[in-house]
């Protein structure tokens, strides 16, 4: 049997996977045998090493290796470990994504010191460090330029656009004495004049004798206070009144009454009756008293707010208790209109900047809501609309309760 036969059991070898048995047969059957084949391979290997050395030395002084422009592939043939990652190297932890290969620094003309490019080092570091010249002002928010805008906008939350119709709240400014108020819309002049007549009637009844004074001194004080506020309004009201030029005297005489009605007996009675008699003369068309009175003084100087609020409460209780049906509203429409006009006038007066809390937007908001509700109630009474009338009553009650819960006025409130 031929020694080259692969069927010879003695010549048969179990070859590792991946190795062709033809090379083994060649070694056995080649005339040179194992030594001859190894010598041949060794000769080739020695020649390859010499060629490789020559390529490293170069073929001339001007010869420069041309860097490869093809990307390096981190792949190896089967069984090679030259680029095999060690324990997951080159892989992003927790993923199956292969990390990007590192760029070789040997293919660059940049000089390197370790892993740091030489370009980052100054040629004369001490000279550079000693240079304290300013590079110009730093960008600050609002100074202009893209960087400033970026700094200004950094950390600013963007509010998503609102949907629907937004609610708007108009806060009234504090009013001066008179100011630019449309007093005729607040309280028509004919209703103001009618209220003055009603006040005169009540005051006349309380000041008949010491006994009637003693019994009604609280009402005298409150009515005189309201009369002083009304007189101050008439000074600036666009409506015409026969005693308009004398309104400042009526204002001060009413304030004198308010101050005198304190205590019981003949002394406070006489002190209160004297200015009232002068008021009667003035309102009947007589001459003004011999008294110095200033023009358009602040409302807080002549009208006590707490006393005005007592009048609000009295009027409110009367309307709520007695005008409680549509029939009653219809039969008492004139009285209801006048009472609402007085409420609106008081609401506007206490909005004056001379009063405490008038600088508070919340206080002014309460006063405006109150005044608007009183105007609405007057218009409802004129139109005999009971539904709107009741809405005005409810709004006034709630507004007064909310306001008194927020601000201290020194009275019982609602």
Image: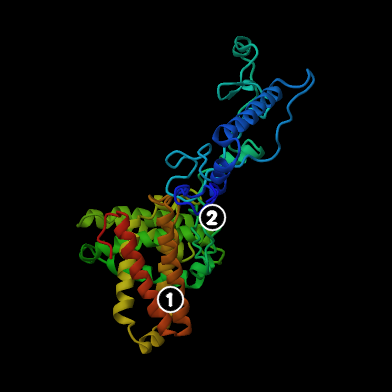
Way the structure is coloured: rainbow
Is any part of residue 120 visible from this angle?
Answer: yes
Residue furthest to the front in view is 1
**x, y percentage for residue 43?**
64, 28
Residue 46 percent coordinates (x, y): 63, 26
Residue in view at x 34 percent, y 87 percent: 325
Q: CA distance from mark 2 to mark 1?
A: 24 Å
Percent x, y of residue 84: 50, 40
Asked which secondary structure carries label 1, the reply is helix
Label 1 crowd (10 A; few <14 / some 14-19 / many >=20): many
The image quarter containing residue 113 is: top right
Looking at the picture, tell me which residue is in the foreground, 251 or 53: 53
Q: Are marks 2 and 1 in contact (CB under 8 Å)?
A: no
Can you identify the residue that label 1 sits on? Answer: 377
Kindly identify the residue that appears in the image at 73 percent across and 27 percent down. 65
Q: 204 or 180, which is in the foreground? A: 180
Q: Residue at x 48, y 40 (%)?
A: 85
Mark 2 or 1: the one toward you: 1
Residue linked to disc 2: 179
Q: Residue furthest bottom?
A: 327
Q: Is residue 370 above or below residue 109?
A: below
Quadrant the C terminus occupies: bottom left
What x and y, as percent, mark residue 200?
Answer: 37, 68
**Camera-nearest residue between 349 and 121:** 121
Q: Secondary structure at mark 2?
A: loop
């Amino acid at each position: 049997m031929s020694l080259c036969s692969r069927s010879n059991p003695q010549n048969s070898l179990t070859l590792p996977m991946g190795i062709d048995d033809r090379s083994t047969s060649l070694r056995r059957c080649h005339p040179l045998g194992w030594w001859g084949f190894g010598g041949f391979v060794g000769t080739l290997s020695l020649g390859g090493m010499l060629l490789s050395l020559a390529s490293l030395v170069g073929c001339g002084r001007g010869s420069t290796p041309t860097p490869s422009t093809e990307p390096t592939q981190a792949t190896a043939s089967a069984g090679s470990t030259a680029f095999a990652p060690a324990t997951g190297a080159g892989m992003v932890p927790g993923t199956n994504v292969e990390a990007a290969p590192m760029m070789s620094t040997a293919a660059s003309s940049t000089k390197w010191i370790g892993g740091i490019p030489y370009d980052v080092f100054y040629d004369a570091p001490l000279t550079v460090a000693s240079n304290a010249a300013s590079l110009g002002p730093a960008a600050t928010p609002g100074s202009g330029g893209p960087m400033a805008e970026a700094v200004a906008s950094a950390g600013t939350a963007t509010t998503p656009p609102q949907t629907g119709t937004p609610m708007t709240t108009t806060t009234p400014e504090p009013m001066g004495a008179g100011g630019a108020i449309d007093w005729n819309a607040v309280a028509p002049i004919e209703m103001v004049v009618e209220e003055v007549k009603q006040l005169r009637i009540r005051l006349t009844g309380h000041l008949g004798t010491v006994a009637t004074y003693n019994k009604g001194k609280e009402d005298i004080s409150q009515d005189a206070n309201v009369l002083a506020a009304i007189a101050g309004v008439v000074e600036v009201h666009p409506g015409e009144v026969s005693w308009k030029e004398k309104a400042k005297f009526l204002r001060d005489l009413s304030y004198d009454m308010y101050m005198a009605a304190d205590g019981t007996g003949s002394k406070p009675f006489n002190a209160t009756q004297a200015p009232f008699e002068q008021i009667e003369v003035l309102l009947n068309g007589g001459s003004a008293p011999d008294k110095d009175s200033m023009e358009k003084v602040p409302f807080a100087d002549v009208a006590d707010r707490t006393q005005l609020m007592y009048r609000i409460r009295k009027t409110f209780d009367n309307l709520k208790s007695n005008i409680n049906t549509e029939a009653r509203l219809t039969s008492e429409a004139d009285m209801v209109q006048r009472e609402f006009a007085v409420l609106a006038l008081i609401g506007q007066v206490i909005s004056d900047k001379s009063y405490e809390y008038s600088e508070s937007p919340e206080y002014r908001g309460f006063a405006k809501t109150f005044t608007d509700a009183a105007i609405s109630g007057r218009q409802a009474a004129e139109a005999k609309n009971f539904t709107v009338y009741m809405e005005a009553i409810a709004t006034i009650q709630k507004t007064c309760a909310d306001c008194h819960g927020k601000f201290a006025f020194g009275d019982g409130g609602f």
